[in-house]
Image (cartoon, rainbow, N blue to C red):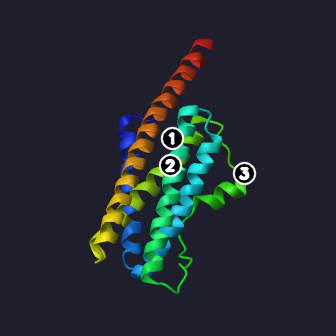
Amino acid sequence: MESPLDVFMKKAEIEEKVKKTLKQITKLPLKDILSYVIKGEKDATALYIFLYENVPSPYLKERFKQFVEIEKSHDRKVTEIFKTLYPNEEPKDIPFKSWKKIFEEREYKLKTVKDYLDVLEIAMEAERLAEEVYLYLEKNVENPEHKKIFLELAKDERDHYEFVSGEYEFYEKAKAEQELQELIRELSER
């Protein structure tokens, strides 16, 4: 059973991973950062499609469906910026850690609260990283319109992170309650 401290430490671990990855990304040229972001938005879209298709709650389905549309719009906006800056080029395939391959290889399904929590952890890390990359881009591009777009995208990613983080905390408590009930049942059977 995870305590509030464990949940806090999990979030601190996510923040540390985000800082480490951000440090690597910001060493890349702008074209590669934009390519990375485009790939990341496609990955985020696939993650929310996965959640939409696998969560049983109608409310969560609707929320994740909205996230799918928002992530698709992010992909379009960043692709437009890429095409404006590099008109005769295509985004490069920038290698980065992707949860998709792991899920596809294992035909991953949400069977337990822990499975859902694991996916939410991935989403929290992805959203925090996306927010930080957009804030970095906003500070490092000259075009005022692009700055505005990157700032808006960072805000969307922050909103997604807040929702996913709230879900994580709620279901972490539910999992802890379930484990406590199982322990009480086991002890009473002895």
The quarter of the picture where residue 170 lies is: top left
- Percent coordinates x, y for residue 104 in the rendering: 69, 57
Left or right of 114 in this view: 155:
left
Of the numbered discs 3 and 2, the one sitting upstream in the chain is 2
Q: Which residue is mark 3?
A: 107
Element class at badge 1: helix
Residue under the image location 55 percent in, 47 percent down: 119
Q: Which residue type carries mark 2?
A: Phe
Q: Which residue type carries mark 3?
A: Glu
| Pointer 1 local density, CA inside 10 Å: few below 14, some 14–19, many at least 20 | some
Q: Which mark is residue 160?
A: none
Q: Are marks 3 and 2 in contact (CB under 8 Å)?
A: no
- Percent coordinates x, y for residue 179 in the rendering: 54, 27
Q: Which residue type carries mark 1?
A: Arg
| Pointer 3 local density, CA inside 10 Å: few below 14, some 14–19, many at least 20 | few
Q: Are marks 1 and 2 in contact (CB under 8 Å)?
A: yes
Q: Which residue is mark 2?
A: 67
Q: Marks 3 and 2, how far apart in space? A: 22 Å
Of the numbered discs 3 and 1, the one sitting upstream in the chain is 1
Q: Is residue 1 visible?
A: no
The image shows residue 3, relative to residue 154, as above or below, that is above
Q: Marks 1 and 2, how far apart in space? A: 6 Å
Residue under the image location 46 percent in, 39 percent down: 168
The image shows residue 28, relative to residue 159, as above or below, that is below
Q: Is residue 157 visible?
A: yes
Residue under the image location 39 percent in, 56 percent down: 128
Is the C terminus in the top left, top right, bottom left or bottom right quadrant? Answer: top right
Residue under the image location 65 percent in, 61 percent down: 101
Q: Which residue is mark 1?
A: 63
Element class at badge 2: helix
